[in-house]
Image (tube, grey):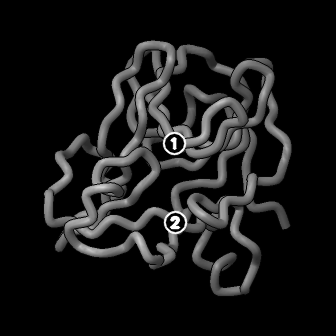
Amino acid sequence: MKNFTIKKLMDAEPGELLQLTIRKQAALAFVIRKTAYETYLGVLDFPERARPFIAIWGGNHECLSYGKGWIIKPIVGKETWLGNDAAYGSPGVIHFDVDLEILKLDASSEGAFGGAIDLATLQDVSIPYNALPVASWDLWTSRESLDAGDAPLFSFGTARRPHSGTGVGNG
């Protein structure tokens, strides 16, 4: 049973986890928001970039959608402590506050601004100074995949492993 669907990028909805082709390379991203002509993506994995970033994509290429049920599991490490100024606001770090899980995204080279995205609402937010930074995390396509003990689709941080799979499209 496959855990993805193939669709056009413009048909993807905010919150969907996608595998798509950017500059003839596979990328793993989620849709932040859409306009009539552009899709704002939180790119988690891309060969040319070491850290997650925001990209604005105007194409309507085919992509794989894993849906909206993706799960991030934080990995608590030696950098995970309140007041860690070295990790605060670093791209790829997830900041946990009382009611927020905030992913910091770097700016893209195409002119998009970097930002901090609340993973629950996909809204731009400010990172509270007292938020707990988590610099390593794993991502699964679904709760079922995590609970079954499957390997994560993607890992970020000290134990980073590239995602597997093939992107489709002609971006």
Query: Could you say where residue 40 lies in the image, as x and y percent from the top left?
Result: 44, 28
Q: Nearer the viewer, residue 160 or 42?
A: 160
Disc 2 marks a residue whose amino acid type is Ser
Q: Residue at x 31, y 36 (%)?
A: 115
The answer for how far apart the CA atoms under marks 2 and 1 are is 12 Å
Q: In the rendered image, which residue does mark 1 sit on?
A: 52
Picture quarter with the C terminus:
top right
Q: Residues within 10 Å of mark 1 (few under 14, many from 20)?
A: many
Callout 2: SS: strand
Query: Could you say where residue 8 lies in the image, as x and y percent from the top left?
Result: 66, 29
Label 2–label 1 contact, CB within 8 A:
no
Q: Residue at x 69, y 76 (%)?
A: 145
Q: Nearer the viewer, residue 152 or 90?
A: 90
Callout 1: SS: loop
Q: In the rendered image, which residue does mark 2 sit on?
A: 136
| Label 2 vs 1, first from the N-terminus | 1
The numbered dot on residue 60 is none
Disc 1 marks a residue whose amino acid type is Pro
State which quadrant residue 148 falls in. Answer: bottom right
Rendered view: 127 above or below 58: below
Q: Nearer the viewer, residue 44 or 86?
A: 86
State which quadrant residue 124 falls in. Answer: top left
Q: Residue at x 49, y 14 (%)?
A: 110
Q: Residue at x 42, y 45 (%)?
A: 91
Left or right of 115 on screen, residue 22: right
